[in-house]
Image (tube, coloured by chain):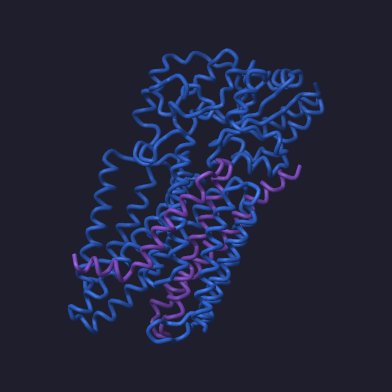
Amino acid sequence: MQNVLQWITNNQQIIYIVILMIFVGIEVIGRVPSVLHTPLMSGANAIHGVVIIGAIIVMGKAEGDNYLALILGFLAVILGTLNVVGGFVVTDRMLEMFKAKKKK
Amino acid sequence: MGLNLLTICYLVASVTFILGLKMLSNPVSARRGNLIAAAGMLVAIIGTIFLYRNTETGEHLHNYAWIFGGLAIGGIIGTMAARKVKMTAMPEMVSLFNGMGGACAALISLVEFNHLSKELSLNNSSEFVSSIQPTVLIIVLGLIIGSVSFAGSMIAWGKLNGKVKDFSFTGQNILNLIILAVALGAGAYLVIHPAHSFLLYGILALALMYGVLFVMPIGGADMPVVISLLNSFTGVAAACGGFLYDNKVMLTGGILVGAAGTLLTILMCKAMNRSLINVLVGSFGGSSSSAATTGGKDQGHYKEISLNDAATIMSYANKVMIVPGYGLAVAQAQHACHELEKVLTEKGVEVNYAIHPVAGRMPGHMNVLLAEADVSYEKLEEMEQANEEFKTTDVVLILGANDVVNPAAKNDPASPIYGMPILEVELAKNIIVNKRSMKPGYAGIENDLFFQPKTSMLFGDAKKVLQDLLAEIKNV
């Protein structure tokens, strides 16, 4: 019990962020029209590509002789970049179409 | 100085993510929102590469060659794949990219655990063990969630492009739960006894298995919901990375997507008037569909219509409503469809499109497709609006849509899609249905509409049929 309370106190910043972000996430897309479900999903998909930051840190910290970390880290960077770049480009392509038809 | 700058980079990125998501939920600002979030991501990535310092040693990152190599490879492949992909294959692509993110999170967990177990082999005092337990917990969570998301997304991707078929067996749900429980149990054990490092690979295997089995029995029509759900999983996996490195931007980005993704999943289910549980557990088909078919008594006969007749009644109609569905997307018939609309309009026929919110495989799928063919925005009518119009419509042309026009959703409480809002096409004077065959749609249920006296069938691939129809109409 003591440990759990201590842990909460030590990590209160993180806990605050998590709780607030849950509300922000729900609030921010609350009124999305169904037409935008797909692009929104795709956009959110690109945003969680932020996991790439973790991959860069893993890669950058790996010692030169730790081949497992180097190889897995390298793979993680590639996959994470795919997620980010592909995600944003696909979303943009979907939205481009929405814009084109708005003009007419 | 450098670290403070990095904090600001992360702050900026976090704000752009929230703003971007907010703007993405409005059609006018959506595109800018996406670009803003992308710019924020770029700031965060560049900041991390050049400004990050190891909190313990104060060292900069190294292995720059590897980092930039990885970024370049991923960036080039990602851009090419995203640019080349056909509009119809967008949903698959999103699923694929989502899987990449999940795999990335899982790999991070593997490497970090590897570091920890090395330290553990040098120092296994009980204080050290209890000091790393929270970290192990987060690593295990990141690994499980990331792997489930990866495996599930790969199956969803395979299903959407037809490489993987639906597959289910009795007791599958129970088996799934057992696998998940064993994986979680092994994870808990590993947190308590981090020295048993081999367990991590067992957990990895179980989580991958769970991801596969979890998506396998779910029908293709429900894939958008599943992808959206897996999308929010990956968000949570990314947030685990945020915990691990005490990295605020990963935390905000991950949790934001986790929360928004979950809500979006629920909204998608609502658009189909089904609950999430119903989508995940009570997969379409099976017992419920046979009940619906037998309940629908003898279906009687359907009648076919010749191209010539179809062309004639459409040319002399006052108002034609086109109802596009997945069949249109598969056949890539959006351009032919637009041609048809133009030719009919020249003949003085009023042509509009009725778009069901979940027509196709993704909400908004039809809008994107038709926009690609330059169909004007004003011609696309949403469901409520279209349902008003059907009363005064002479001909409804249904192109590869099925479940979204099935009257069973309105009048057969035994039907699995009962309660789903539909396009009430039976209000129109004539209905022409283009399908490849009499096979039921993705929900696996018969459609009474096809057997009604007003309805006539026009079999064949949507693109081919439309082109032939177009030629006939020009001759009328």
Residue B22 sits above or below residue A52 on the image: above
Name the quadrant of the C terminus of chain B: top right
Residue B196: image location, x then y, percent: 22, 71
Residue B68: image location, x then y, percent: 55, 76
Which residue shows up at 34% across the image and 29% down it?
B287
Which residue shows up at 33% across the image and 67% down it?
B139
Nearer the observer, B92 or B358? B358
Question: Which of the 4 image quarters holds residue A71?
Answer: bottom left
- Image colour for chain A is purple
Q: Can residue A104 be seen in this view?
A: yes
Which residue shows up at 71% across the image and 35% down it?
B378
Which residue shows up at 45% across the image and 77% down it?
A59
- Image colour for chain B is blue
Residue A91: image location, x then y, percent: 59, 54
Residue B197: image location, x then y, percent: 25, 71
Nearer the observer, B216 or B41? B41
